[in-house]
Each structure stands twice: as structure tokens, then as C-alpha cells.
Image (spheres, rainbow, N blue to C red):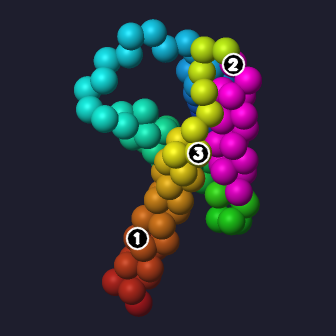
Amino acid sequence: MTRRVYQAIFLISIAIFTFLFAKEVKGAANLFPHIDKVAHFGIFFVLAIIMDKAFKLPLYSQILLLALYGAGIEIMQDSLPYRQASFADFVADFAGAASYFLVKVIVFKYKRKSNG
């Protein structure tokens, strides 16, 4: 896929995830404790993948932008009467994004070592 396609997917993903983070959750099925943290981690892992393919930005810039988005989501949720902000959710957001980049760096070093 081209960078433009990834950029479109990234923007659509941001819109959908922002809507979902703002949506009122009623009677959510609790499959296990802290399922929301797993969801935050997974969403930000996926966003990091898409962002990395969509934009030519330094790694630290991508992590910073995703961290700011995560903080913005928590601020937005704190302003909604039916949601609440959670520092643990922000940590899960950051961990999800950082985990992708950590995996990427490790894989890159492994490939480079194997080829060189």
C-alpha cells in the first residue's frame, strides 16, 4: 500500500477510535479485570503501526504525538458526564505505542545482524 493509503487509514482510525473513546458504555461485558487497559494498549499498538507506515517522522515524534493523543483522550473523557479519565488508561496507551516501536527496533537490529 502507498503512504497516502496509510495516511487515509490513520485519519479514519483516529476518527473511529476517538468516537469509541467518547461513547457511553452501558453494561459492558467484563470478560476479565482491566479489559479496558488491554483495549487501550491494543488500539495504540495498532495506531503506532499505521502511523509509522503513514508518516516519515522520527520515532520519538511518533511516540510523542501518540502520547499527546492519549492524554487528549483522557482529558476528553474527563469532561464527559458518563466517562472518567484514568491515568492507568494513559499508561496503557503509551505502553501500546512504545511496544510497537520497541518491537520494530529489535526486529530491525535482528535483520541487520542477520544480513550483515
Q: Earlier in the sequence, mark 1 or mark 2?
A: 2
Rendered-image quadrant of the N terminus: top right
Q: Which residue is mark 2?
A: 80
Residue 38 on the magenta span: no
* Residue stretch rendered in magenta on the structure: 64-80
- Cα–Cα gap, marks 1 and 2: 40 Å
Rate crowding at label 3 as few (under 14), some (14 to 19) or many (20 or more) other CA atoms within 10 Å.
few
Q: Would residue 89 appear left or right of 7 to someone viewing this image? A: left
Q: Amino acid at mark 1?
A: Val
Q: Which residue is mark 1?
A: 107
Q: Earlier in the sequence, mark 1 or mark 3?
A: 3
* 78 versus 111 height, above or below: above
- Cα–Cα gap, marks 1 and 3: 30 Å
Disc 1 on helix, strand or loop?
helix
Residue 3 place in picture, x, y as percent? 65, 45
Q: Residue at x 65, y 65 (%)?
A: 59
Q: Which residue is mark 3?
A: 87
Q: Residue at x 66, y 27 (%)?
A: 77
